[in-house]
Amino acid sequence: MNEELDSQLSAMFDDELPPAECELLARRLSRDEALKARWGRYAVMGAVIRVERGVRLNAALAGRVNVAISAEPALGNAVAPERMRRAALRWWQPVAGGALAAGVAAASVLWLHTQAPLTVAPLSARRPPTTAAAPVAVANLVPSGNNSYVTPLAPAVRPMLVPSTQLANYVVAHSMFSSPVARRNLLSSFITGEQTPAGTEAVMDEAKSNAQ
Amino acid sequence: MSADASDLSLVRRVQRGDKGAFDALVLKYQHKLVKLVMRYVRNPAEAEDIAQEAFIKAYRALPQFRGDSAFYTWLYRIAINTAKNAVVSRDRSPIEYDLDRNSSDESYDMQGRMKDSETPEGLVLTDEIRSTVNAAIDALPEDLRTAIVLRELEGLSYEEIAAAMDCPVGTVRSRIFRAREAIDRRLREVFEGGLGRAEELG
């Protein structure tokens, strides 16, 4: 037997071998029966030196445990599915996160689409033939005690929405005459739902007259 | 160097499905575990049964072992709990009398249940092992004997032994290895001869 190997085995038995060498020797120890028998005798020597009275030394216990463990399933099979499940979770986590973010973004865009025409109601109101249709919020003025505010009797009726294609055409047609700044303002107000800036219409009218 | 690195490398192998690595852990700790269990039960055969059960429980629980504590500390706790449970259940269980069994069956059963270590040749072998190891230690040169005794009896690390013996750590490792080799040469003969005798008797 290789003396260096035996020296390493002795050091490993005492937990005095570097971890990297332990890894290599552990692999050999688990397969080499002669090495395992020597390892077992090292344990017997220790038991005798420590005067472990009453302890039997002919390794019958190890044999019985070996037989019992042989009937058990190998642990690698039990550990592997757990690791695979964790690995799958690790893989799915960013994908699921991305999908969730994309879903939220899509929902936001859809919500903006449904909300945006409301903000341009005044704009569409100026084009009766195409946008008219439904009555715009009917608010009855109800005299109250101090007449300081008005309350609608019936819930506000949602105005007829301007078809998005018409609105888009309107924006494109006007963008030909509007300055980049005004166009940006108009688009940004359209997207964010703000009222059209007061100056924008003036700028648009001016641009239209210049073009004519 | 991390203490318990050797146990941990064996444990990792078992966790990956290498049962042979568990044999090495059992061989290393079987005597310590039986001695530990004998604090709870006097009978050596019962102590071995409990130790065996503790090893099997440890094997089954190894997937949960993360290495936060030393393997032996973890095994020690399992053995203590197993021993306590065994003592409690033994005290609760009534004594069984099987009056229908005839005497020949009983003697056969007793033989079947008798552990190898309890058989006369097993006991003789244990005594022979003890006397062989003690004789081999007595025959060792002083520096080898001191090194192996400080390691096994006092549980000192190589560094502590080096400090005590005023020599490099590498020398300590070499002395302990040579001491073990000298003892093993004699011990191997006993094991091989003992097994041969047992087979002849069987």
Image (cartoon, helix red, strand yellow):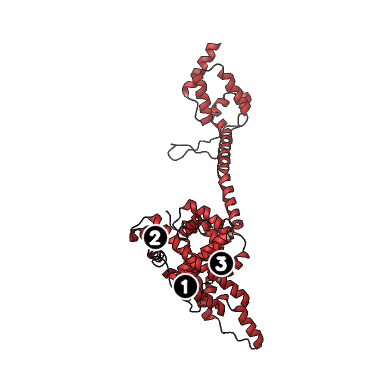
Q: Position of residue A149 (x, y in %)?
A: 45, 37
> Badge 1: few (under 14), some or many (20 or more) residues near its Cα, within 10 Å?
many
* Depth order, front residue of B117/B1: B117
Q: Chain of mark 3?
A: B
Distance from the alpha carbon under mark 2 to that under mark 1: 22 Å
Amino acid carrying label 2: it is Ser
Kindly tell me whether residue A157 is visible in this rendering: no
Q: Nearer the viewer, residue A128 or A92?
A: A92
Q: Which residue is mark 3?
A: B56
Please identify the quarter of the rendering in which residue B70 is found. bottom left
Which numbered mark, 3 or 2, is in the foreground of this view?
2
Q: Name the quadrant containing residue B93.
A: bottom right
- Mark yes or no: residue A173 visible: yes
Q: Provide the secondary structure element on which disc 2 rests.
A: loop
**CA–CA distance between discs 3 and 2?**
30 Å
Give A90 or B175, whichever is nearer the viewer. Answer: B175
In this view, the residue in front, A94 or B193, is B193
Element type where label 1 sits in the image: helix
Is the N terminus of chain A in the top left, top right, bottom left or bottom right quadrant? bottom right
Q: Which amino acid does the dot numbered 3 rest on?
A: Ile
Chain letter for the residue marked with disc 1 in the picture: B
Q: Is residue B139 above or below residue A83?
A: below
Where is mark 1, residue-wise? Answer: B35
Q: Which mark is residue B157?
A: 2
First of labels 2, 1 by sequence position: 1
Seen at 49% across and 70% down, the residue is B31
Chain-order first, disc 1 or disc 3: 1
Q: Position of residue A3 (x, y in %)?
A: 50, 56
Q: Residues within 10 Å of mark 3 (few under 14, many from 20)?
A: some
Residue B83 - label: none
Q: Earlier in the sequence, mark 3 or mark 2?
A: 3
Q: In the image, are marks 1 and 3 on the same chain?
A: yes
